[in-house]
Amino acid sequence: MDDAGHAEITEPTLWKKSGWIAKIIKNEDDDGWAVSMTRVGDDEPSLVGPWTMGRDKRNPKPLDASAFATLVKGASEVLRRHEAAARERLHRSLSFATDDDVRVRVDLDIAPDDDDPHAILAVFAELSGEELFRGRVAPDFKLTAATVQRVMRGGDA
Protein backbone atom coordinates (compact mmCIF):
# COMPACT_ATOMS: atom_id res chain seq x y z
CA MET A 1 0.00 0.00 0.00
CA ASP A 2 1.22 3.51 -0.72
CA ASP A 3 0.86 6.53 1.57
CA ALA A 4 -2.50 7.47 0.04
CA GLY A 5 -3.94 4.12 1.19
CA HIS A 6 -4.39 2.74 -2.32
CA ALA A 7 -2.85 -0.44 -3.68
CA GLU A 8 0.41 0.10 -5.51
CA ILE A 9 0.66 -1.06 -9.12
CA THR A 10 4.01 -1.66 -10.79
CA GLU A 11 3.26 -3.11 -14.21
CA PRO A 12 5.44 -2.54 -17.30
CA THR A 13 3.07 0.13 -18.72
CA LEU A 14 1.25 1.31 -15.58
CA TRP A 15 2.60 2.43 -12.22
CA LYS A 16 0.49 3.74 -9.36
CA LYS A 17 2.51 4.75 -6.37
CA SER A 18 3.05 7.66 -3.97
CA GLY A 19 -0.11 9.46 -5.09
CA TRP A 20 0.76 9.34 -8.82
CA ILE A 21 -0.23 7.24 -11.82
CA ALA A 22 2.16 6.81 -14.75
CA LYS A 23 0.59 5.26 -17.82
CA ILE A 24 2.27 4.49 -21.14
CA ILE A 25 -0.08 5.20 -24.03
CA LYS A 26 0.07 4.87 -27.80
CA ASN A 27 0.98 8.17 -29.46
CA GLU A 28 -1.83 8.61 -31.97
CA ASP A 29 0.21 11.11 -34.04
CA ASP A 30 2.94 8.62 -34.98
CA ASP A 31 4.24 5.12 -34.34
CA GLY A 32 5.73 6.05 -30.96
CA TRP A 33 4.63 5.99 -27.37
CA ALA A 34 3.84 8.61 -24.75
CA VAL A 35 3.63 8.61 -20.97
CA SER A 36 1.02 10.46 -18.94
CA MET A 37 1.46 11.42 -15.29
CA THR A 38 -1.70 12.00 -13.31
CA ARG A 39 -1.98 12.84 -9.64
CA VAL A 40 -4.38 10.41 -7.94
CA GLY A 41 -7.76 12.13 -7.73
CA ASP A 42 -7.14 14.54 -10.63
CA ASP A 43 -9.22 14.28 -13.80
CA GLU A 44 -6.49 15.35 -16.21
CA PRO A 45 -2.80 14.43 -16.46
CA SER A 46 -0.28 16.94 -15.12
CA LEU A 47 2.30 15.91 -17.67
CA VAL A 48 2.26 14.07 -20.99
CA GLY A 49 5.46 13.46 -22.88
CA PRO A 50 7.17 11.14 -25.32
CA TRP A 51 8.21 7.68 -24.16
CA THR A 52 11.14 5.58 -25.31
CA MET A 53 10.73 2.56 -27.59
CA GLY A 54 11.88 -0.78 -26.29
CA ARG A 55 14.65 -2.88 -27.82
CA ASP A 56 12.30 -4.40 -30.38
CA LYS A 57 11.57 -0.88 -31.75
CA ARG A 58 7.83 -1.66 -31.68
CA ASN A 59 6.76 -1.79 -28.05
CA PRO A 60 7.41 0.77 -25.31
CA LYS A 61 10.25 0.48 -22.86
CA PRO A 62 8.80 -0.76 -19.54
CA LEU A 63 8.47 1.64 -16.62
CA ASP A 64 10.91 1.17 -13.75
CA ALA A 65 11.51 2.78 -10.36
CA SER A 66 14.08 5.26 -11.65
CA ALA A 67 11.92 6.40 -14.57
CA PHE A 68 8.88 6.67 -12.31
CA ALA A 69 10.78 8.82 -9.79
CA THR A 70 11.95 11.13 -12.60
CA LEU A 71 8.41 11.39 -13.95
CA VAL A 72 7.01 12.21 -10.49
CA LYS A 73 9.63 14.93 -10.07
CA GLY A 74 8.80 16.45 -13.48
CA ALA A 75 5.02 16.32 -12.98
CA SER A 76 5.36 17.80 -9.48
CA GLU A 77 7.40 20.68 -10.91
CA VAL A 78 4.74 21.34 -13.57
CA LEU A 79 2.08 21.52 -10.83
CA ARG A 80 4.27 23.76 -8.66
CA ARG A 81 4.80 26.19 -11.54
CA HIS A 82 1.09 26.17 -12.37
CA GLU A 83 0.18 26.94 -8.76
CA ALA A 84 2.79 29.72 -8.59
CA ALA A 85 1.40 31.29 -11.77
CA ALA A 86 -2.13 31.13 -10.34
CA ARG A 87 -0.94 32.87 -7.16
CA GLU A 88 0.75 35.58 -9.24
CA ARG A 89 -2.46 36.23 -11.16
CA LEU A 90 -4.37 36.68 -7.90
CA HIS A 91 -1.79 38.70 -5.91
CA ARG A 92 -0.11 41.97 -6.76
CA SER A 93 2.18 44.09 -4.66
CA LEU A 94 3.50 47.63 -4.89
CA SER A 95 5.78 49.83 -2.76
CA PHE A 96 5.97 53.61 -2.81
CA ALA A 97 6.34 56.72 -0.63
CA THR A 98 3.08 58.47 0.29
CA ASP A 99 2.56 62.22 0.10
CA ASP A 100 3.71 62.27 3.76
CA ASP A 101 6.99 60.51 2.80
CA VAL A 102 5.96 57.27 4.53
CA ARG A 103 7.20 54.16 2.69
CA VAL A 104 4.34 51.70 2.26
CA ARG A 105 3.83 48.25 0.78
CA VAL A 106 0.47 47.58 -0.81
CA ASP A 107 -0.95 44.09 -1.35
CA LEU A 108 -3.89 43.46 -3.66
CA ASP A 109 -5.39 40.00 -3.33
CA ILE A 110 -8.09 39.06 -5.82
CA ALA A 111 -10.79 36.66 -4.64
CA PRO A 112 -11.60 34.21 -7.47
CA ASP A 113 -15.33 34.17 -6.76
CA ASP A 114 -17.91 34.12 -9.58
CA ASP A 115 -20.77 35.12 -7.28
CA ASP A 116 -18.99 37.93 -5.42
CA PRO A 117 -16.01 39.22 -7.43
CA HIS A 118 -13.78 41.48 -5.34
CA ALA A 119 -10.27 42.11 -4.13
CA ILE A 120 -8.79 43.07 -0.77
CA LEU A 121 -6.43 46.03 -0.70
CA ALA A 122 -4.07 46.16 2.28
CA VAL A 123 -1.52 48.90 2.98
CA PHE A 124 1.37 48.41 5.42
CA ALA A 125 4.08 50.75 6.71
CA GLU A 126 7.30 49.22 5.36
CA LEU A 127 9.44 49.94 8.44
CA SER A 128 7.06 48.86 11.20
CA GLY A 129 4.83 46.43 9.29
CA GLU A 130 1.80 48.17 10.81
CA GLU A 131 -1.37 47.83 8.78
CA LEU A 132 -2.47 51.31 7.72
CA PHE A 133 -5.50 50.38 5.63
CA ARG A 134 -7.55 47.35 4.63
CA GLY A 135 -10.56 47.47 2.39
CA ARG A 136 -12.54 45.83 -0.33
CA VAL A 137 -12.12 47.02 -3.92
CA ALA A 138 -13.16 45.89 -7.39
CA PRO A 139 -11.27 42.86 -8.75
CA ASP A 140 -10.04 44.97 -11.68
CA PHE A 141 -8.69 47.70 -9.36
CA LYS A 142 -5.80 49.52 -11.04
CA LEU A 143 -2.93 49.22 -8.58
CA THR A 144 -1.00 52.51 -8.69
CA ALA A 145 0.29 54.86 -5.99
CA ALA A 146 -2.35 57.44 -6.97
CA THR A 147 -5.32 55.03 -6.81
CA VAL A 148 -4.16 53.57 -3.49
CA GLN A 149 -3.79 57.00 -1.91
CA ARG A 150 -7.22 58.04 -3.23
CA VAL A 151 -8.83 54.95 -1.63
CA MET A 152 -6.98 55.57 1.64
CA ARG A 153 -8.37 59.12 1.72
CA GLY A 154 -11.87 57.70 1.36
CA GLY A 155 -12.28 58.19 -2.36
CA ASP A 156 -13.66 55.74 -4.87
CA ALA A 157 -11.62 52.80 -6.04
Image: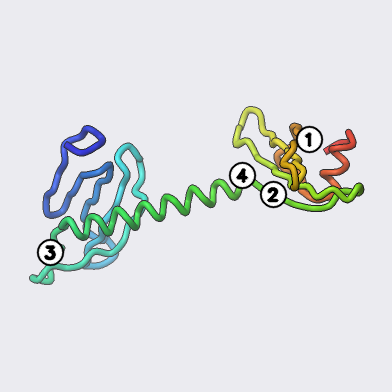
Query: Residue drawn 65% across and 39% down?
Result: 110
Crowd around label 4: few <14 · some 14–19 · many ≥20 (10 Å): some
Residue bearing the label numbered 1: 133
CA separation, marks 4 and 2?
10 Å
Q: Are marks 1 and 2 in contact (CB under 8 Å)?
A: no
CA separation, marks 2 and 3?
52 Å
Q: Are marks 3 and 1 in contact (CB under 8 Å)?
A: no
Q: Residue 33 appears at what percent x and percent y?
A: 22, 62
- Say the numbered circle drawn on residue 59: 3
Q: Residue 17 appears at what percent x and percent y?
A: 21, 44
Crowd around label 2: few <14 · some 14–19 · many ≥20 (10 Å): some
Query: Residue drawn 77% across and 43% down?
Result: 125
Colouring of the image:
rainbow
Residue occupying the far top of the picture? 115
Indicate whether 14 appears above or below 70.
above
CA separation, marks 3 and 1?
63 Å
Residue 116 lies in quadrant = top right
Q: Are marks 4 and 2 in contact (CB under 8 Å)?
A: no
Indicate whether 66 appears above or below 4.
below
CA separation, marks 3 and 4?
45 Å
Q: Are marks 2 and 3 in contact (CB under 8 Å)?
A: no
Q: Nearer the viewer, mark 4 or mark 1?
A: 1
Q: Nearer the N terminus, badge 1 or badge 2?
A: 2
Q: SS of the residue at dot 3?
A: loop
Image side of residue 130 versus residue 55, left or right = right
Question: Which amino acid, mark 1?
Answer: Phe
Q: Nearer the N terminus, badge 2 or badge 3?
A: 3
Residue bearing the label numbered 4: 90
Crowd around label 1: few <14 · some 14–19 · many ≥20 (10 Å): some
